Image: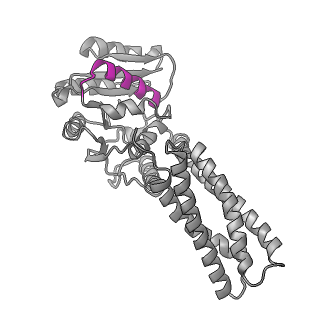
Amino acid sequence: MDYKQIPVIIPSLEPDEKLPRLLEQLHEAGIQNIVLVDDGSGPAYAHFFDDAQKRWGCPVLRHAVNLGKGRALKTAFNYCLNTWPDAPGCVTADSDGQHTPACILKVMKALTDRPDALILGCRNFDEKDVPLRSSFGNKCTRFVFKALVGLAITDTQTGLRAIPTAFMKKLMHTGGERFEFESNMLIDTKDAGVPIVEVPIETVYIEENKTSHFNPLKDSARIYAVFGKFLFSSLSSSVVDLALFSLFCFLLAPVVSGTLYITLATVCARVISATYNYLLNYKIVFKSRENHGMAAGKYFLLAVIQMACSAGLVSLLYALTGGFSELVIKICVDVFLFFISFQIQREFVYKKRGA
């Protein structure tokens, strides 16, 4: 298949004159297969989609009500997989004119060169004309992805993507119906072992992106909710661990000589809190497909090492500080160990095997 025949998906909600202008430019550039998704725009906007069908023969997939960008993309994925089963994948683009035909063609060509990879058309957010809300939102999510997912991505919110066919099929089962779906897509590349290739594109913002339906507060909250479960699991486990540590210190200090009671309290508290944390992470946070025995073995190996480090460091610092509060010392030590533990859990313990 010639790369210009790769289907281009354009989801749209309440479009304006920029949509027919984009469609005309795409046809002039030789792009032949354009699929529109009317995501519940309503009768007032029907003429944009009707004209696209009549003038350029674009298939229009319609939602009776607004279901969100994630659902619109899945609707189009299903259509493309059935209509062009031999295509190397598809390209998604926004309807507001941010993605020029030259940039779309660039991403389409990249997919033919790397049919195994997710291709991202990445903008430069250091340019002076970028709206503040777009620059701030992207930089925040870029930091979150790097810190919590381990993915260094220049433009996490880009709508210009080329998606290989095999990965499209997996994405049909990916959670998220609105803008958070695009973040979930990036996370799933890591789980599925799909490489990411970045292609620099022109940074275009029309009318300071006023027509965008992305809400930087509401939709960013949905995106960050992807990580909220892990943070809750970790924090609640820490509360359980600290509460039990304090209880065991209170019970053991009068009957155990020296600082040995700190080690015993750490062990008892960590065994209970680690069991709680493992079950929460396996069932709810990561929804792991890893074999239970394998995941549990790796998790508890990590827990033992972390427990030994915690006990050793707390005891050492307690002795060096001349009896400073063991609880305060433990909080400081465990915050440090938390960040190391997170990286190991993400990359080693709960890493899903590509299905």
In this rendering, is residue 260 above or below 139? below
Task: Left or right? Give the position of 281 relative to 124.
Answer: right
The residue under the point 49% across, 45% down is 290
> At which x and y percent is residue 11?
39, 27
In this rendering, is residue 188 above or below 247? above
Asked whether residue 136 is drawn in magenta, I would say no
Q: Nearer the viewer, residue 343 or 258?
A: 258
Q: Is residue 267 visible?
A: yes
Q: Nearer the viewer, residue 101 or 299?
A: 299
Task: Left or right? Give the position of 38 relative to 284.
Answer: left
Task: Left or right? Give the position of 54 relative to 220.
Answer: left
Magenta-highlighted residues: 69-87
Q: Is residue 92 visible?
A: no
Residue 202: name its quadrant: top left
The residue under the point 67% across, 86% down is 319
Colour scheme shown: one colour
Q: How many marks?
A: 0
**Extreme residue in the front direction:** 293
Quadrant for the C terminus in the image: top left
Quadrant for the N terminus in the image: top left
The residue under the point 35% across, 22% down is 36
Secondary structure mostly taken by the magenta-highlighted segment of the chain:
helix
